[in-house]
Image: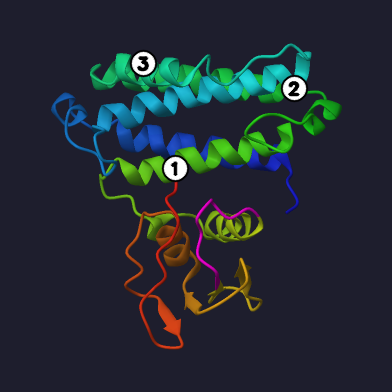
Amino acid sequence: MTIDPLVLMTDVEAATGALLGAAASLTDAEIGAPSLLPGWTVGHVLSHLARNADALTNLLTWARTGVETPAYASREAREAGIEAGAARPVIEQLADLRRAHDRFADAAAAMPAPAWAVALPMARSAAAVPWLRLCEVEMHRVDLGRGYTPADWPEPFAIRLLRAAAVEPPAGSPSMVVRADEFGHPLTFGAGGPVVSGPARSLAGWLTGRGDGSDLTVSPDGELPEPARWK
């Protein structure tokens, strides 16, 4: 799948602006409310989004400087960082998320062209890092559980997400064929199998565990395959 990191950064900017605008309507009481992610509050999701921006900034810094800069120091450090910020008031959450995004955007702007080709953990090249960030912003905005759903995803994002999932299916993905209404050619997962059809947004939401697939069809008739656990 062809990746243009500069085009994707434009999408990241737009998605982040929309996320910040939507989150600005949250109340401090809602920060402690459950999100759609088991065990996480709305505040956990926002805290994670800020720390993820910093993690991906680390990867771009690694690609640009050649100095090994892991996304997170450890799994424990990742979890501690999310937990430490989860209960903050809305105004602090938004300010942190905005600053973290700005650091990420600055790191992307500082990348010389050759650095985008550097291979990194979590990504085949640094050029994929803006795509990783866009996925985080779009999917976790859904996870806030405040009215934004896969049906609201930009169509180009949903289509790219489907194609990316077919190229590198998550571990445990069932064998199947996915056919989106928006484009003619099928996407084959594994050895192929039942054909799951429907709108691209619905397919992408179902595949990522953020939709129930109720408007999808299966051929031959039967139950929808069980999608792999997504991040």
For discs 1 and 2, the disc positioned in front in the rendered view: 1
Query: Tag 1, which secondary structure?
Result: loop
The tag on residue 194 is none
Q: Give the range drawn in magenta.
A: 168-176
Q: How far apart are marks 1 and 3 (CA)?
A: 18 Å
Image depth: mark 2 or mark 3 in front: 3
Per the image, the residue denoted by label 3 is: 80
- Give amino acid for label 1: Lys
**Screen quadrant of the N terminus:** bottom right
**At numbered mark 2, what does the secondary structure look like: helix, strand or loop?**
helix
Residue 117 lies, in percent from the top left, at 81, 33
Numbered mark located on residue 63 in the image: 2
Q: Closest to the observer: 143 or 147?
A: 143
Amino acid type shown at disc 3: Ala
Residue in front for this viewpoint, 228 or 134:
228
Q: Name the residue under label 1.
A: 231
Residue at x 60%, y 21% (from the top left corner): 57
